[in-house]
């Protein structure tokens, strides 16, 4: 598998989180676009390439290495200092539709493992995402 750029790897993780339940909703896809356009980690990324990067990720998922291969190449491409950011971006996509399916939970668990995230860090990121997406009703 080719080594993606850091930007591409971050997008791969959002895509696999969205696709984990085999239903990439419009809300999730819009959130991926919002994250790419507004988060400082994506500074310098041409957001016109987003669809192509997402399609590349989908192709990689259909290779023999599948999800494990995508997680491995993404983890290699993302510097340690951005691993919490990578998890936060993936979690943002999972939390945006206000429901977390079992498949998304499992992908996030695999993501935490592949990024070697500390439990306290990942719990804090999860808590912050829940707080951001909570509604009054």
Image (cartoon, helix red, strand yellow):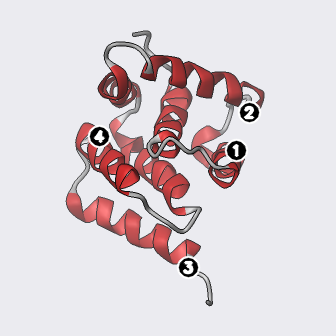
Mark 2: few/some/many CA within 10 Å (<14, 14-19, 20+): some
* Residue indicated by mark 2: 47
Residue at position x 40%, y 13% in the image: 63
Tag 3 secondary structure? loop
Q: Is residue 126 above or below residue 26?
A: below
Quarter of the image with the C terminus is bottom right
* Residue indicated by mark 1: 33
Mark 1: few/some/many CA within 10 Å (<14, 14-19, 20+): some
Tag 4 secondary structure? helix
Residue at position x 46%, y 46% in the image: 21
Residue at position x 64%, y 49% in the image: 25
* Residue indicated by mark 4: 115
User: Looking at the picture, how far across and down is residue 86, in whole percent?
Assistant: 44, 44
Tag 1 secondary structure? helix
Q: In the visual, does 27 lie left or right of 64?
A: right
Mark 4: few/some/many CA within 10 Å (<14, 14-19, 20+): many
* Residue indicated by mark 3: 134
Tag 2 secondary structure? helix
Q: Which mark is residue 25?
A: none
Q: In the visual, does 45 lie left or right of 91?
A: right
User: Looking at the picture, how far across and down is residue 15, in whole percent?
Assistant: 53, 37
How far apart are labels 3 and 1 at the CA level?
Answer: 20 Å
Q: Is residue 120 above or below residue 34?
A: below
Contact flag, marks 2 and 1 (Cβ < 8 Å)? yes
Mark with earlier residue (2, 1): 1
How far apart are labels 4 and 3 at the CA level?
Answer: 26 Å
Residue at position x 66%, y 38% in the image: 43
How many numbered circles are shown?
4
Q: Residue furthest right?
A: 48
Mark with earlier residue (2, 4): 2
User: Looking at the picture, how far across and down is residue 32, in whole percent?
Assistant: 63, 46
């Amino acid at each position: 598998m080719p080594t993606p750029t850091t930007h591409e790897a971050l997008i791969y993780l959002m895509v696999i989180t969205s696709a984990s339940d085999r239903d990439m909703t419009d809300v999730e896809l819009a959130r991926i676009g919002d994250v790419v356009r507004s988060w400082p980690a994506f500074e310098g990324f041409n957001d016109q390439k987003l669809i192509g990067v997402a399609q590349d990720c989908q192709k990689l998922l259909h290779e023999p290495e599948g999800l494990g291969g995508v997680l491995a190449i993404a983890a290699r491409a993302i510097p340690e200092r951005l691993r919490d950011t990578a998890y936060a971006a993936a979690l943002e996509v999972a939390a945006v539709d206000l429901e977390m399916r079992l498949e998304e939970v499992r992908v996030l668990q695999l993501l935490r493992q592949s990024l070697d995230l500390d439990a306290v860090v990942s719990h804090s990121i999860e808590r912050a995402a829940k707080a951001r997406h909570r509604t009054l009703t």
